[in-house]
Image (tube, rainbow, N blue to C red):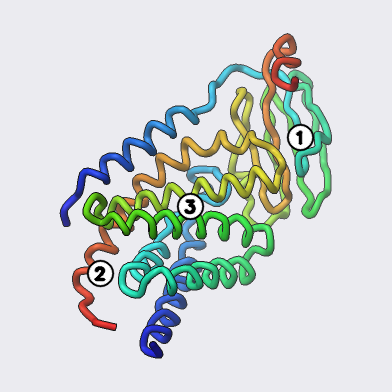
Amino acid sequence: MKFKLGDILIVALIVITAFFMIPKKSKGCTAVLEISGDTIKIFNLSKDTEYTFENEYKSTIVVKDGKISVKSSNCPDNTCVHSGTISHNGELICCLPNQMLIRIEGDPLEMDVITG
Amino acid sequence: MIKKVTTCGVLTSLAIVISTLERFIPLESVIPIPGIKLGFSNIIILLILLKLGFRYALPSVICKCAVVSFLFSGISSFIYSLFGGILSILGMFILLKFDRCFSVCGVSIAGAALHNVGQILAASIMLQSSYVFAYLAMLLFVSIITGTVTGLITDVLNTRIKVVL
């Protein structure tokens, strides 16, 4: 098999796009729970809590030691549970079957910049 | 014509079988990104595209997405994989028109990357949030590896199978 010039172009294009897409990571202080784009709840990461909600599936979210994770969920693929804990800006926990997204937001001072 | 349709049907069912077997590989627990897959069924789809053409490959992709999604995960997963699948097959079809510049491997890498872009687009529409694009970087890096592997396998199959349909 012979590689051709265009192949290098394709790979280069993908790598460049990927590098631009790498999210910038910084320590966050709040976590936002969204379902289908609507904000359901905002968690303060410095307070340990446990929160259970039910959309199409039932998920339990845990905040502990400044990190948030999905402890359990009865959705079919369980990617949200495998995602583990997140605590940095740009990190996500996403559950497609449940249409749920948890994202971290940064400094309270930067908050209105991000949401605005 | 009948021979082509039959071959396409057999190959599509093979793609469905590969997709099904892939579900048993717990890739999502290693790289926790929803919808991440090895994409080996793309070998078959690309082979259909090479041997039979776009007219057979497009229905084959739609059929594969529909059967696999409805058997195992449901309507939302169908939308994600359909978006990815169609974008991927369109991209590969266009690139194969310029096969002087692109090898099968390159086309396969582009197909894998486009599949991910399509899925993320679908996810951002479904979840109504652009934050899911944070996954794209990782998915694109993985797609270069998986795309190369599937591309090499497809190339071997394409040169070895010399059936004229």
Q: Are marks 3 and 1 in contact (CB under 8 Å)?
A: no
The answer to whether residue A60 is seen in the rendering is no
Write the residue at 43% across / 47% down. B113
Same chain for the residues under marks 2 and 3 in the image: yes
The answer to whether residue A22 is left or right of residue A10 is right
Q: Which residue is mark 2?
A: B157
Give the CA separation, mark 3 to mark 1: 27 Å
The answer to whether residue B105 is left or right of residue A14 is left
Disc number lying in front (2 or 1): 2
Chain to which the residue tagged by mark 2 belongs: B
Q: Which mark is residue A33?
A: 1
Give the CA separation, mark 2 to mark 3: 22 Å
A91 to B26, vertically: above or below: above
Write the residue at 47% across / 38% down. B138
Q: Nearer the viewer, residue B21 or B99?
A: B99
| Outermost residue to the front | B97
The answer to whether residue A40 is left or right of residue B66 is right
Could you tell me residue A57's position as x and y percent?
77, 53
Residue type, mark 3 in image: His
Residue type, mark 1 in image: Leu
B17 to A15, vertically: above or below: below
Compare marks 2 and 3 and give the one earlier in the sequence.
3
Chain to which the residue tagged by mark 1 belongs: A
